[in-house]
Amino acid sequence: MAQNYYQKEIETMPIEEMKKLQSEKLVKQVKHVYENVPYYKGLMDEKGVKPEDIRGIEDLHKLPFLTKADLRDAYPYGLLAKPLDDCVRIQSTSGTTGRRVVAFYTQNDIDLWEDCCARAITATGATKKDVCQVAYGYGLFTGGPGLNGGSHKVGCLTLPMSSGNTERQIQFMMDLNASLICCTPSYAAYIGETLKEQGYKPEDIPLKAGIFGAEPWTEEMRKGIEEVLGIKAYDIYGLTETTGPGVAFECSEQTGMHVNEDHFYAEIIDPDTGEVLPEGSKGELVFTSLDKEAFPLLRYRTRDICVLSRKKCSCGRTLIKMAKPMGRTDDMLIIRGVNVFPSQIETVLLNEGYQPNYQIVVDRVKNTDTFEVNVEMTPEQFTDKVGEILAMEKSLANAMKAMLGINPAVHLVAPKSIARSEGKAVRVIDKRKLI
Amino acid sequence: MAIRQLTVFVENKQGALVSITDTLSKNNINLRALSIAETQDFGILRLIVNDETAAEKILADEGYLIRITDVVGVKIGDAPGKLSEALKVLDENNINMEYLYAFMARTEKHAYVVIRVEDNNAAEKVLEDAGFHLITQADICKL
């Protein structure tokens, strides 16, 4: 079991050696960014930091942070560090104006990303003898392409299913003996429930393991998926800004995710002061990409609240471990794997002629997220015709779908009917118990 | 000519309707007719009352979402086929109905039909031309 490494030398590298490697990469990376990304050079100049001030990983804290706001300001090319002709791919998050992240990749960037995913796949015990069913969405979303590439690197027979069409997923899984599945945890649970309804017992299902990420999930959910599919369920972490899935991955110990820290250096900071916190402290997770070429974000604030640990792991990996994120420092929600900001809902309402009086209600029913938006009508919008109100709800839902990429159930409600606490409306009710 | 219907948004919550009728009764508003259209999430209560201006103010002050809509009121005979006669007139003149509801007169041998159409004037004209007697808000108050 302990031998499930894809790049053993890196994955089990002594900590001092890893620090040396990270330092070398960082010095080069800072120079690359300073010379090629005027936006970040501006931030460094403003802070009075020169590339020569960064002599090793211990100097990282001197560099300025990047936030989602910077990504918005610099959209689309402002953080690009390579000429476009050296880039071979983009990936993107859902959402429109201001919230969409477009990340660029050179062939080398794709290779290192796929290596990271290959490490995650290998850590589940999978080898080239396995059949890997990728049921993450393919396309702009990083899930499908990332795991697909990782599966190729390991040499698995790859089933590029993309998400959805559960009947077909099950047919391919059973007919081609898929032994590993990669998708969102809620989709895994859904496939599991469907298999159960069709009379399959865990021992009838060829799967041995699954890699699940892109949305928050609990230990209870893990247990449920493991039982219904008869597998071991592994967590994976990543974000488009950094590269995609594979920034960190779980090993057989299932006590946190090993960060691929030869590529992505993790820090925990105090979200209020920006100060770096010692290992074991709870704070905001920050990533520095050490060797990405096209879209090398330095000190990117993920807004995920997390804890890092260097505690020795039974799997033999020395890579630092991050806990499952414990929340957000902003108001972002992850609904059915899609990032949703309340401000996006607000934008749609204003565009469509509504007052920004709304409430988002999220729940998880049968392992699938439900997403409702209650919107207060103004007296002018109210009509005595039921059909008109239903049509207004539908049209608002369509506008939100266009903005977010997922479909909410919109309910128009009476003015001032949305609960206000201390005069302030409660914008989000998240009934999912994820933490 | 038209009569003025009070339309109230009713949330799909326990006691939502009774709190509206309670508010009206406490303020001595008398209901003449009502109809509810409901969906899974909400209902639309349509009321004909003796004093719609007072009722509107009372409900608005209570925070209800309301709207006054002009609707056509027609008096029809209390006999089989009388409603059909009125509806045929609208149909023959290509006047689309959104909805309708009816109520009986207490003393006279008559029924009243409240009809929601897009163009009240057109509907009123064809009904009158066909010999129907229209009722007005003043009639409602006297009922």
Image: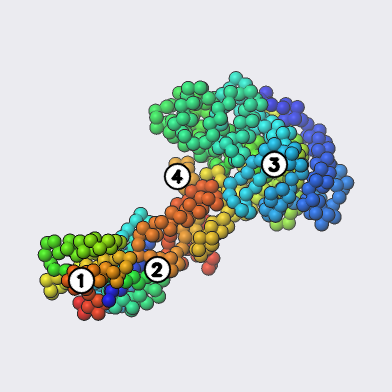
- Please provide percent x and percent y for residue A434: 54, 46
Residue matched to label 4: A365
Disc 1 chain ID: B
Query: Relative to residue B59, is residue A147 depicted above or below?
Result: above
Disc 4 chain ID: A
State whether discs 4 and 1 lie on one chain. Answer: no
Q: Type of residue at label 4?
A: Val
Q: Type of residue at label 2?
A: Leu
Query: Relative to residue A269, is residue B110 depicted above or below?
Result: below
* Whole-number angstrom distance, CA of label 4 to CA of label 1: 59 Å
State whether discs 2 and 4 lie on one chain. Answer: no
- Ranked by sequence position, the earlier of labels 3 and 4 is 3
Q: Type of residue at label 1?
A: Asp
Residue matched to label 2: B65
Q: Which residue shows up at 70% across the image and 36% down it?
A: A88
Disc 2 chain ID: B
Image disc number at residue A14: none
Residue matched to label 3: A104
